[in-house]
Image (spheres, helix red, strand yellow):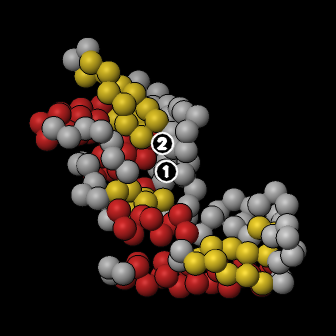
C-alpha cells in the first residue's frame, strides 16, 4: 500500500518529526511526548488515517504507517501487513514489513463472516445450494460450509507459518 509520498527528503522530514514528537503507547496507539495526547486515527475507508502538521503543511498517513515509523524510525521497505488481518489492530507486534506479493495473500482468506452462512469467506450458491469459497485464486465447492471454512483456514494458517520463516 503506497503512502503517496515519493520524495526521499520529505520522507526523512516526516520520520524525523514523528520520532521526535511521538512515542509508542504499547496498545497500538502513539502519543505526543509533550502533552501525552494520543494521535487519533480517523477514516471511513478500510484503514484509519491520521494527519499532522510540519512547518505549516499538513501531511496524511495511514495510522499503521505512523506507528511503524515511530517504532522503527523509517518508512517500511515494502508494505505493512496486519498479521491477524484486523486493519484496526495497529499493535507493533501485529505489523510486519512484507513485499506487495506477500501482502496480497491476506486478501485470499476473507476475515469477515458472510451474512447468510455466518462463516467467513463461505457463500451459498443460489442455483444448487452448494457452498463455495475462494482459496489461492481458485473456487472450491462443498456441501458442508463448516468443513469448507475449516479446510480453507487450515491452508491459510499453514501458508502464514511458512511465510513467517522466510520468503514464500
Residue at x 73%, y 75% (from the top left corner): 132
Please tell me the numbered disc located at residue 81. none
Disc 1 to disc 2: CB gap under 8 Å? yes
Residue 129 percent coordinates (x, y): 87, 74
Is residue 4 visible from the viewing direction of this image? yes
Residue 130 percent coordinates (x, y): 83, 78
Q: Which residue is mark 2?
A: 29
Query: Is residue 153 placed above or below 60 in the rendered structure?
Result: below
Q: Nearer the viewer, mark 1 or mark 2?
A: 1
> For the residue labelled by badge 2, is the local secondary structure a helix, a strand or a loop?
loop
Query: Is residue 82 placed above or below 12 in the rendered structure?
Result: below
Q: In the figure, is residue 24 to the left or right of 72?
A: right
Residue at x 68%, y 85% (from the top left corner): 151
Mark 1 or mark 2, earlier in chain:
2
Please tell me the numbered disc located at residue 90. 1
Q: In the figure, is residue 76 to the left or right of 101?
A: left
Amino acid at each position: 500500500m503506497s503512502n503517496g509520498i515519493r520524495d526521499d527528503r520529505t520522507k526523512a522530514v516526516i520520520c524525523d518529526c514523528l520520532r521526535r514528537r511521538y512515542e509508542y503507547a504499547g496498545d497500538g496507539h502513539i502519543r505526543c511526548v509533550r502533552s501525552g495526547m494520543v494521535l487519533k486515527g480517523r477514516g471511513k475507508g478500510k484503514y484509519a488515517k491520521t494527519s499532522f502538521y510540519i512547518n505549516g503543511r499538513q501531511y496524511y498517513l495511514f495510522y499503521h504507517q505512523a506507528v511503524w515509523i515511530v517504532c522503527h524510525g523509517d518508512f517500511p521497505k515494502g508494505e505493512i501487513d496486519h498479521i491477524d488481518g484486523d486493519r484496526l489492530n495497529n499493535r507493533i507486534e501485529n505489523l510486519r514489513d512484507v513485499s506487495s506479493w506477500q501482502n496480497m495473500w491476506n486478501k485470499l482468506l476473507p476475515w469477515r463472516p458472510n451474512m447468510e452462512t455466518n462463516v467467513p469467506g463461505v457463500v451459498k450458491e443460489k442455483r444448487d445450494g452448494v457452498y463455495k469459497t475462494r482459496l489461492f485464486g481458485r473456487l472450491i465447492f462443498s456441501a458442508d460450509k463448516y468443513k469448507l471454512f475449516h479446510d480453507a483456514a487450515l491452508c491459510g494458517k499453514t501458508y502464514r507459518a511458512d511465510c513467517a520463516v522466510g520468503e514464500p
